[in-house]
């Protein structure tokens, strides 16, 4: 019998190594879209990318934002970034957060509550061209977008009933913004949700740590690795050895 739930991810090149879930739900299919022919897994079904872009980030974003194009035979989809390990039964989240909405995400781990703050952070971390980010920020506010009281969602995990018509409209719009402006999807999602008028649920960040473990991407630079540890929560220390920086987690018991 065809399963209703799919967990999926996308990996381009060697940016991430495919991570096996610590908890496997037999009621879910697990699909990894990739151009890396060396990927092997006993859990994940490896599927080649259908669309390719010069920027590999856009190649993975295309899969990430448009599950209705790739996974239309499933009722529910759960996206996870390639650096995330599943450690609990994530189908529980669908029952909790997709009852009254077609999309749900976790709150931003650093409690950013405005597009302005997200753009500033992206510029500082050199996540995209400064001129692109500033243009996009100013455009959104000029079109009437106003920041609310809620946190901006983090997009490393996305729960969706992805075949709903209004959500498809929103996801196509989201992709258009990522393709046209900055590729930073956390910048564009709040505006798109406001413009299309789709309700979405924000999940408390503490729940993220109950269901997932987030590591740094294999291709990340030093600043990105620090951000990964901040996202994961808890304490960490930065050490140097032979002129290289190393980051290690500190358990709360030993702090």
Image (cartoon, helix red, strand yellow):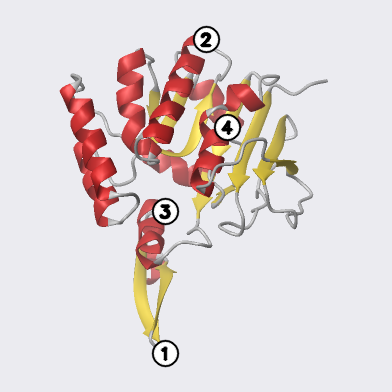
Q: Is residue 225 above or below residue 48?
A: below
Q: Earlier in the sequence, mark 2 or mark 1?
A: 2
Residue placed under numbered mark 2 in the picture? 165
Residue annotated with mark 1: 242
Foreground mark, 3 or 4, reads: 4
- x%, y% of residue 144? 18, 19
In the picture of the structure, the residue carrying the numbered disc 3 is 232
Give yes or no for contact between labels 3 and 1 (Cβ–Cβ under 8 Å).
no
Q: Residues within 10 Å of mark 1 (few under 14, many from 20)?
A: few
Across and down, in percent, residue 244 comes to 40, 82
- Residue 97: give x, y in percent of width and height: 47, 23
Return the disc, 4 or 2, that comes first in the chain's sequence.
4
| 117 with respect to 10 (left or right) | left
Q: Are marks 3 and 4 in contact (CB under 8 Å)?
A: no
Q: Which residue is mark 4?
A: 78
Mark 4 neighbour density, 10 Å: few (under 14) some (14–19) many (20 or more): many
């Amino acid at each position: 019998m065809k399963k209703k739930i799919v967990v999926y991810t996308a990996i381009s090149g060697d940016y991430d190594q495919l991570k096996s879930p610590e908890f496997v739900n037999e009621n879910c299919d697990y699909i990894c879209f990739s151009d890396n022919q060396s990927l092997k897994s006993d859990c994940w079904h490896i599927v080649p990318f259908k669309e390719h872009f010069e920027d590999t980030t856009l190649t993975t974003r295309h899969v990430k934002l448009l599950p209705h194009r790739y996974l239309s035979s499933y009722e529910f989809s759960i996206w996870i970034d390639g650096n995330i390990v599943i450690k609990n039964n994530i189908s529980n989240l669908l029952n909790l957060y997709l009852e009254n909405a077609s999309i749900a995400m976790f709150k931003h781990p650093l409690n950013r509550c405005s597009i302005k703050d997200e753009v500033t952070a992206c510029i500082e971390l050199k996540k995209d061209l400064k001129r692109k980010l500033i243009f996009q920020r100013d455009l959104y506010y000029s079109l009437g977008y106003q920041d609310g009281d809620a946190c901006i969602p983090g997009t490393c995990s996305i729960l969706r009933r992805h075949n709903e018509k209004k959500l498809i409209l929103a996801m196509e719009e989201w992709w258009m913004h990522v393709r046209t402006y900055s590729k930073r999807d956390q910048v564009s999602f709040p505006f798109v949700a406001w413009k299309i008028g789709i309700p979405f649920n924000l999940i408390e960040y503490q729940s993220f740590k109950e269901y997932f473990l987030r590591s740094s991407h294999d291709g990340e630079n030093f600043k990105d690795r620090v951000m990964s540890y901040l996202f994961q929560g808890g304490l960490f220390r930065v050490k140097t050895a032979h002129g290289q920086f190393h980051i290690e987690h500190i358990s709360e018991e030993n702090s």
